[in-house]
Amino acid sequence: EKADIGVTGLATMGRNLARNFAHHGYVVAVHNRTEERTRQLMDDHAGEGAFLPSGSVEEFVASLNRPRKAIIMVKAGAPTDAVIEELAAYMEPGDMIIDGGNANYEDTRRREAALKERGLHFVGTGISGGEEGALNGPSIMPGGAAEAYKTLGPLLEDIAAKVDGTPCCVHVGPDGAGHFVKMVHNGIEYSDMQLIAESYDLLRQALGLSPAELAEIFREWNRGELESYLIEITAEVLGHVDAATGRPFVDVVVDQAEQKGTGRWTVQSALDLGVPVTGIAEAVFSRALSGHPDQRAAARGLAGPDATAKPEAGVHADLVEDVRRALYASKIVAYAQGFDQMAEASKEYGWDIDLGAMATIWRGGCIIRARFLDRIRAAYDADRKLPTLLVDPTFASALSEAQDAWRRVVATAATIGVPTPGFSSALAYYDGLRRDRLPAALVQGLRDFFGAHTYRRVDREGSFHTDWSADRTEHSA
Ligand code: 6PG
């Protein structure tokens, strides 16, 4: 008997994905560079389903049914290239290599093109949901050729999370589309976490609430429109007490946020595409700021606001509700920006990404799963060509209801000296977008003044230059 699918790279994610396939009745070929991991999987989980262990890549490929489907779950970058080469050497035209890691979409485009020349399919696939999701149902974002999805898709849809019976898996688009969308998912994950962190920090600093009290507030928030996995686990983390010291866990963790790169890639790509993903960018930069302890130590003595600038007693409940609204409004902005980025990349690369479908497959399984995504899906269902999520009637009215609170929160934060780059930049984006006239006109004037870069006029077609250094007459450029 041969395997329906294979997984090579049996660290936590790979192992759990293999078990998920086995739980769904598939025969799963398993392989790992060092055989110990393969043995471990067989020792611990062989009874859960049909696994075919292999000691070598050649044996692993030979154990697969044609067209062969081999999923790679190894570190992004050079290790992935190495495994692709090894697999491809034993594969035949029509076979598929599926990369389930957090690869950079440009690598995926390159690999897909190279393997296509050899008659092989390369399916760069975003997989979200961590260890738990991999085992019990992740959100899956496969790219690659539609033809490959025809045979591969049903297996992936089987093991994916389901929401209202709909699998959280859809063919995103050709070549790197799947990994691109996963990258933006992670960028949004960064901004979600940043906004949550700002909410926690502001309420703690302004009102002197304890982590345990804040855990309760997040638990409460999770019963409303903010309901999501990240809010749910925020309550867990804030409520956790360190066993060794008896202190709140959050107070014994070093306050320097790390990153593996997907958030940074999102911002790099957004800069190239010209899409303002300010929420994601501020989240990435906030992590970077936290990671400079020397600068932070040196700056600790800089002047801050008068300590009496704290909000007055009695504002407690109001500020909590204001922050909840600011969080929701800023979250709408962050998602709107992420969806804009997917739309722009889709145009740039000819991917034809269905944005509503992305919201649909993010409703379950992934880290940013949230009730809110149903609303995004509905927004794109109602208008596929929505210029920005902010103008969808549901979101527009949510923003309108939240905006006063949002402004108070940003003002309070600035007054008491608590940094809220996520809230503030989201509000600035909102105000920028809805502005009738922007000061970009002045920027254009300055560019023309020092560099003869020209400008367009509101009342006539064409480009113009003013002769700033002489008589200031205007010429058609
Ligand atoms: C997911 C997560 C997953 C992972 C990130 C974390 O969707 O399951 O996003 O991909 O947790 O790698 O990224 P950072 O280490 O950069 O925070």
Image (tube, rainbow, N blue to C red):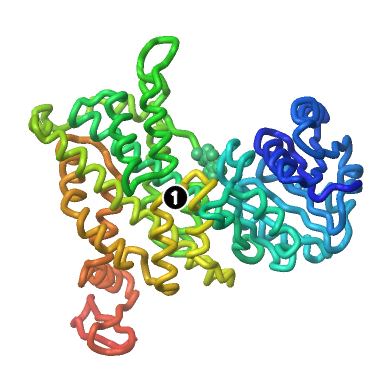
Residue at x 26% of width, y 48% of height: 424
Residue at x 83% of width, y 30% of height: 35
In-image side of 259 versus 396 (left or right)? right
Query: Tag 1: Cα neighbours inside 10 Å, few (<14), some, or many (≥20)?
Result: many
* Residue 123 in the image, given as x and y percentages of width and height: 70, 57
In-image side of 80 versus 353 (left or right)? right
Q: Which residue is mark 1?
A: 188
Please give the count of numbered marks on the rendered protein.
1
Residue at the front extreme, as displayed? 165
Q: Is residue 207 visible?
A: yes
The one of 428 and 212 positioned closer to us in this rendering: 212
In the depicted structure, whether residue 448 falls above or below residue 239:
below
* Residue 343 in the image, given as x and y percentages of width and height: 48, 67
* Residue 19 in the image, given as x and y percentages of width and height: 71, 38
The one of 132 and 410 positioned closer to us in this rendering: 132
The one of 166 and 273 positioned closer to us in this rendering: 166
In the depicted structure, whether residue 232 falls above or below residue 181:
above
The one of 268 and 167 positioned closer to us in this rendering: 167
